[in-house]
Amino acid sequence: MQPCSTLGPNPLIFSAKLMIQSSLLGKFIKTGHSACFFPSPPAPKWFDGQRSTQNRQGTLSEYCYTLVNLPNKISRCLHVVNFFKVRPDDMNPVTDSQIKKPEVFLLPKDAKKNSTDITGPIVLQTYRAIADYEKSSTSEMALKAGDMVDVVEKSESGWWFCQMKNKRGWVPAAYLEPMDGPDESEEQEPNYAGEQYVVQKSYTAVEEDELTLKEGDTIEVIHKLLDGWWVIRKDETTGYYPSMYLQKAGEANTSVKSELRNRSAPPRRSTIRNAKSIHKQGRKQISQETYRRNSKKYIQSRRNMKENFQNKANVITEKNEREENKPKAQPAVPPRPSKDLILNRCTESTRRKIL
């Protein structure tokens, strides 16, 4: 098992412990063991501080010690053995000089299927607030321009879960900027082919470059932006729309998504007043006119391609029809054999009858 980092919280270690705890309970409670028989995993702490780090490591050590001292039937079972198996990264831990860029904690979708899926210590990515932000609910976190926050989770909705000293909460991504440059490397390039989505919540446009849509409308997403305002296309019109009110076509609705839509849409970057960036060069932006122009070009090229394909299909169909309607040549009638040829090739019985 990889040790917990002393530099800060490592929620993945706690998640892995919760997964192995769940696996053990599911395996042995069915055989008559009581849940009280198993040690309780320590709860993660999201704030920094030497004392909290020492306390966290102490509870992790106590949990592991208690686990390996359970009866052999449990402490030597495959779940526990795989959990404590030595991995290559354990023998060669990553040093500070080898860390090129910090990563955000994202638990894989299939992590619950494998209780031994543990990565190295996680270093949260630090962002800077470009303006003051007043929270509107208890789940959010207020910011002052210049505040440095660690991003725990980046949501496509444009709300990011952050921590700052002993505070944590949701923050609009539009109010944060990376330390190494004004551009977001995670943002994808526009995809004018578009992905089909369905509107799950109506929204009335406030700005000129936004779209007004009703629940149930089908649209195409052509650019996913980190601030939660995606560029979409409805017929030939493009504009911004809150991503948290959209759902990919064919995907099932979940309680988490439904609860998220009850929140208000995050503010857009363009609406932030008195923004103070530390970067001299501004963040690159694509104008809505460019989106519309490139989108129309793509739609026209798609139509031309479809028409060319249809024309080729029509030509092939016409050619096949002509071949089918073309009169077929009648087979030639062979000449009647002569009497001598018949007598030469027929049987003796036939020859007697003829003669």
Image (cartoon, rainbow, N blue to C red):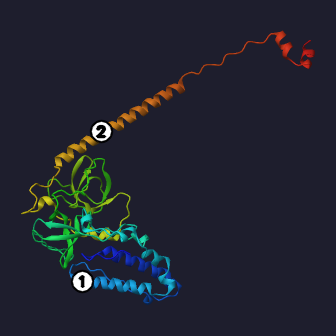
Asked if residue 250 is positioned above or below residue 237 in the image, the reply reads: below
Judging from the image, what secondary structure is the residue with disc 1 in? helix
Q: Residue furthest front?
A: 91
Q: How many marks overall?
A: 2
Position of the N terminus, as image quadrant, is bottom left
* Left or right of 140 in this view: 120: right
Identify which residue is drawn at 49% across, 76% down.
Answer: 78
Q: Earlier in the sequence, mark 1 or mark 2?
A: 1
Q: How many other residues sit within 10 Å of disc 1, few (<14), some (14-19) or many (≥20)?
A: some
Q: Looking at this view, name the residue that lies furthest to the left.
A: 274
**Looking at the picture, which amino acid does disc 2 mark?**
Ser
Between label 1 and label 2, give the one nearer the viewer: 1
Give the percent coordinates (x, y) of residue 62: 36, 86
Q: State the image coordinates of residue 346 (x, y, percent, origin top left).
A: 86, 17
Q: Which mark is residue 339?
A: none
Image quadrant occupied by the C terminus: top right
The amino acid type, in three-letter code, at marker 1 is Ser
Name the residue tied to disc 1: 52
Marks 1 and 2 sit apart, C-alpha to C-alpha, by 60 Å
Could you say which is closer to the camera, residue 348 or residue 122? 122
Is 342 positioned to the left or the right of 223 in the image?
Answer: right
Residue 341 lies, in percent from the top left, at 82, 12
Q: Which residue is mark 2?
A: 301
Q: Nearer the viewer, residue 340 or 10?
A: 10
Badge 2 local density, few (<14 within 10 Å), some, or many (20+)? few
Residue 148 % position (x, y): 15, 70
Query: Viewer-proximal residue, 56 or 213?
Result: 56
Q: Which image quadrant is residue 146 in?
A: bottom left
Residue 320 vs 1, above or below: the answer is above
What is the secondary structure assignment of the residue under circle 2? helix
